[in-house]
Image (cartoon, rainbow, N blue to C red):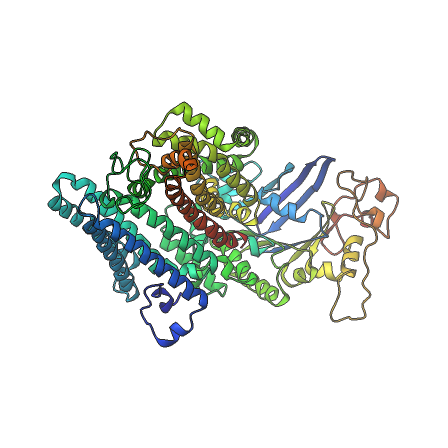
Amino acid sequence: MDRTKLISGVFFQLIPTKETFENRSGKWWFALLALVGLALIYISGLILVAVGSNSGIGLQVVAGTFVIGLLVLVSSAWRRWMVEQEFLTKKRAFIWFIGFCVIIVIAVSVASFAVLPAAALDLWFALVSGGFTLGFACLLLYDFYPVLKERGNPGLAVTAGILLVLSIVYMTFISYWIVPHDPFTLDVGLPLAPPSSRTPLGTTELGQDLLSRTIAGGAIMLQVAVVSVIVCFIIGVPTGLAAAYRGGMVDRVVSLVMDSIFAFPGLVLAIAIAAMLGPGIINMAISIAVVYVPSYYRVIRSQVLSIKELPYVEAAVVMGARDWEILFQYILPNALPSAIVVLSINFADAILTAAGLTFVGLGFPIDIADWGYDLTAGWGVLIIGKWWLMVFPGIMIVLLALGFTLAGEGLSEILTPKLRE
Amino acid sequence: MTNALRIQDLTVEYKTRRGVARAVDRIRLSLEENRTLGLAGESGCGKSTLGRAIMRLVPYPGQIADGNIYINIDEDIPCKEGDIPKGEVDITELNEEQMRVLRGKEIAYIFQDPMTSLNPMLTIGSHFVQMIRAHDPEIEKEEALDRGKEVLEGLGILPERVTDYPHQFSGGMRQRVMIGLGLVLRPRLLISDEPTTSLDVIVEAQILEQMAELKKKFNLTMILITHNLGVLAQTADDIAIMYCGRLVELASVENVFEAPQHPYAQALLLSVPDVTKPDKKLVWIPGAPPDLVDPIPGCMFNPRCPMAMDICKTQVPPLIESETGGLVACHLYGGK
């Protein structure tokens, strides 16, 4: 990749000559406008909410995270500039970058203890995690966009999907500081009051502010999705790899177990396990993980079965490679892209299943803000015309699932040609 | 002259659903150091199976049923599960770990299809590093990479291309990389299984030329498996012709091309087109090779042989010394 490609992102066209702008395609302009427009809406919405926040320092928190994000971006840009100018080696520059990040974290912790000693840890966590999420989003646009752009539309889909997920993650991280009301306080307004200036998205059956609950409600869903997908990945990939590589009896037994899990309808099985284990993030994640492990196992197994017959694996044997080298350097890297695609699509599935579990009453008690819970409650009152209770949490679930699906579908298209190579 | 490789009564069988097929039938062969043996024959005659048997990598239903393969080793090779002593080693007796150590270090193998023989997820450099470190875990990564670069440079590939991935190379370059990978540990024996079949003639000539150079440089003993007799005429010292798993003729290149003894060798040469003789009438061999699962008695070639006698249908001809100094398995020459 040449230099001009390396330093051009969406926002950061460092050499904005006339022709670089004239040469842009319509798609590029559309993507830029959509991105800038959505970002503006998102940011102005954040600021609007933050101004009237319950904690009183919502605006400061948002501004703080933006400053941290920018600092991360600047230090990363500096790192790359140093490497390009050959002042530092890649490794050295990366260590410097990590050092900057650590300094930012320490500075933030000092600042948060100085400002708000009572809730310093919460403030520090919100600032650091929110700030680094923003920083990551900026880096995605600045650093990886040129890489993704080379892949055409799938690259755009991946970028859009990841940005969507990151914006929801960011909102969740700082939710405590920007919500207009405590999401658990009862009787903020009248029960089931329609959207008004005091409660912009209406209230729940118990008079809780729906806007606050919508902003804060993603935490559980995200945690459940992340934990369950990681558990799935950790169990499904190694078993698939081992079973397919070993073959014979091991393969048959494991396949039989996996296929019997697969034969159950997913949600029913998840409900059964969740009912058995009881409520809780980990339990919910486990019940979802059990449902989705077989899909990883199957994908990895079939991939390994075909890859281990390929000439380059045989060539490795001929050159005297050890068994584990063949497994981890030849077979796994070639099988992994398809598992990663399953992973990103499963994120969306896990979120919907988590919502489904809460929907049937196996989720969390009422004092926890959760989109799934509000969705369930809203379903009950939809018939009497109280649409807002169901619509807003529903939109958030759809957006999050959409983000993961876009990222997954795009990734599958980006990674598959390499497999065929 | 010592023998780099000695094969004694090697039999390889494929256990199929229809029965046992003998792909290699009691082959006896010895190969002197620094010589190139060309292994020729039509498809399915067992030449690739023989090559793989020397690596002990006969594909699945097949197994080495009988016989010994001795290779000569210069120095003791340390191995976790029993060191391999120097001198003549019977590789059919070695355990899996010893065999793994031997592969790549003493015997190298080059496959027919360079397009899929390299891992698409690893750079060329990592192939070299991984290969060298599999045999010598103590070696530094940089040093291994330098050795890879050196070998690649000798093969006409720019050393800075070690950071490239296989799909960024052409077919001929990939085959050169494969050859480089095979030779980086200085093996004594190189088995190449139709190394140039999928390449065009210009690249083929280049690669054959380079292989001949490398053979000199590294003191290699080579087995070249091919059905292309023209390639053998260029590169081999001796030619072994196989038919239905048996060795029918073994002689020096000149003798095989000037005065082939076995009727099958004669027929094989008649079927090769010759640029200098455009009027040459190509003769094919009528019929097809017999079924290996249900072999016919006597000489396997007798149904297609123009000079078949009665004895050919009952007795297997032994491999005897021919008039030109090679070996031949035919009853025509036995009646001295």
Can residue A139 be seen?
no
Image spot of residue A335 (x, y percent): 49, 45
Q: Is residue A51 above or below residue B217?
A: above
**In-front residue for pair B48/B60:** B60
Q: Nearer the viewer, residue B321 or B91?
A: B91
Q: Residue furthest left?
A: A114
Count of numbered marks: 0
Identity of the residue drawn at 47% across and 35% down: A293
In the depicted view, which residue is nearer to us: A303 or B158? A303
The answer to whether residue B231 is visible is yes
Residue A235 placed where, x, y %? 43, 34
Corner quadrant of residue A286: top left
B71 in relation to A70, above or below? above
Q: Position of residue B128 (x, y in %)?
A: 45, 53
Q: Looking at this rendering, what residue extends furthest in the bottom direction?
A: A18
Q: Position of residue B97 (x, y in %)?
A: 49, 38
Residue A33 relative to residue B198: left or right = left
Asked whether, in this view, residue A322 is left or right of residue B244, the answer is left
Q: Please, which residue is most extreme toward the top here?
A: A276
Up the image or down, A421 lies above or below A203; here it is below
Left-right relation of B158 to B267: left
